[in-house]
Amino acid sequence: MAAQPHRPYSGLSFVLPAIAAALLLAGCASTRGLAPQGHAVEADALASSRSLEPHALSDAAFPAADWWTALGDPQLDALVREALQDSPSLAAADARVRQAQAQAGLADAARGPTLDGSAQYAVAQLPKTLAPGEMSDKVMHNTVLTVNFKWPLDVWGGKRAEYEAALGQARATEVDAQAARLALAANVARGYVALAQAFDALDVAQREQARATRLHDLGKQRVDAGLDNQLQLRQAESLIASARQQAQAAQQEIDAGRNALAALLGKGPDRGLEIARPQLLQAPAPALPGVLPSELLGHRPDVVASRWRVEASSRGIDAAKASFKPSVNLSALAGLASVGLSDLFSSDALLGFGGPAVSLPIFDGGRLRSNLAARDADYDLAVAGYNQTLVGALHEVTDAVQAARALDAQIASATQARDAAQSALDIAAARYDAGLGTQLDVLSAQRPLLQLEQQLTALNAQRYAATIDLDRALGGGLAPAGPDAHPRSDTNPDLARAPTP
């Protein structure tokens, strides 16, 4: 029989039918009935205009990046800068960012071709029981040099989707790191306000102790003169002891506040001893940009991070769907092999193998469907997290601005009441000095003054805290980049309608 002529592309006659058969069998693994259920909420659909409108100013801007400077204390500014430089919590957030970026890099690398090289030298000796005759007991030297090429073609875009999903998670982690910085700055500012409140409470206790001491001295004079008895003296001593206890409690709060700030700075407790008394100057009036709530999405790092996770989960669904379809891989192996080094680089030592390969799922026990169902659930969880974060963001903004307005009114009323109580005490003390009044009159006037001074201390601290909460709720001057909106009806049409920062 005559030899058939060599046809270099005759292998295509086998490959093309194989691909066609693979496409026909692909229906054995179906995505039928599987789809995500989550629906992203439109920000403007969350009714907030009636709650925010009385406080909104159309020309008001979002907070500046250094929003804490509005409180007017240079020491606070320095503490926040120190915390943002040295805090271990931020180092952990940065490490998570690098970890997520590395995962995205791995997903990207899986999309491209690989080329591996290997070299092997082996010595073999076959026993007579396996190779009788001339081959037995003969030592053979084998040398093999190979280059292996592999390229999994991304025909359906599944590997790209996996990469984009990992990239979306990395972007979310980057925004999380920004959120961690915002949270740390807010915690330092809040701790600083608590320290200021503790110092103010110490002042109140010391003033009360001074008033009680004066009352005691006056009472002693009256006892010595025979005008009063020991009862009034003991009552004054009780007031002094009570004020002293309040001063001791305030000092404990000061020590605890300094320790807490030192920990936020990532330093030991001795660093807290260097923190001087806060000198907060002002709590700015609350103001809201008139573009809320839609513009809030681009300024809140937690909302932007949640939006990135929705996008990443959506791409994960695309990747899972692509695994239902046939995969095509190109591979080639080329090298040199010989039983001796002298023949290794001769034409007879050439070694080669390669070509395209097609594979597809036919029966996998439900693995692919379960994987897609899990990706759908991941998407639903991401959407639910996004919706909850958005609702929580508007809640925080509304709470902060309403609290600031209400506290301003309460502080004004409490200040008026405190001034009236001080006048009443001055009158009662003057009458007692002149012998026209009793110690009971002084005690009755002194008690509400103490309560009002303590109340004002707490209200002022709450007012500063409301300023911090509002700046944080409005994003703290950050504007993290969010994913672009683009409709993808093949995954979930609701994603195209979801609000994008």
Image (cartoon, grey):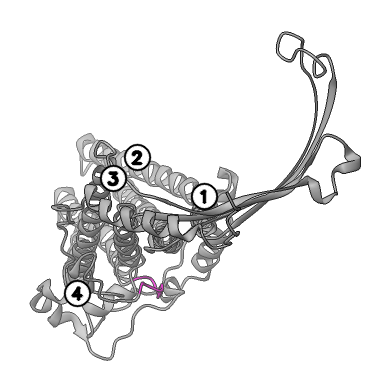
Q: Residues within 10 Å of mark 2 (few under 14, many from 20)?
A: some
Main SS type for the magenta part? Answer: loop
> Do residues under tags 1 and 3 come within 8 Å of each other at their CB atoms?
no
- Number of the label disc, if any, that sits on residue 368: 3
> Badge 1 is on which residue?
92
The residue stretch that appears in magenta = 475-483
Comes first in the chain, label 4 or label 1 = 1
Q: In this view, does 101 lie above or below 359?
A: below
Q: Distance between the residues labelled 3 and 4?
A: 28 Å
Foreground label between 2 and 3: 3
Q: Does the magenta stretch include residue 430?
A: no
Q: Can residue 224 be seen?
A: no
The kind of secondary structure element at disc 2 is helix
Residue 265 % position (x, y): 53, 53
Kindly report which numbered mark, 1 or 3, lies closer to the viewer in this rendering: 3
Q: How many numbered badges does the structure rendering display?
A: 4
Q: In the rendered image, which quarter is residue 65 located in?
A: bottom left
Looking at this view, is 434 or 134 the one in front? Answer: 134
Name of the residue lying farthest toward the front: 1
- Mark 2, residue position: 245
- The residue beneath circle 4 is 497
Q: Where is residue 31 in the image (x, y as percent from the top left)?
A: 20, 53
Q: How crowded is mark 3: few (under 14 residues within 10 Å), some or many (20 or more)?
A: some
Q: Which label's residue is closer to the chain start, 2 or 3?
A: 2
Q: Where is residue 421 in the image (x, y as percent from the top left)?
A: 18, 63
Q: Which amino acid does label 4 sit on?
A: Arg
At label 1, the amino acid type is Ala
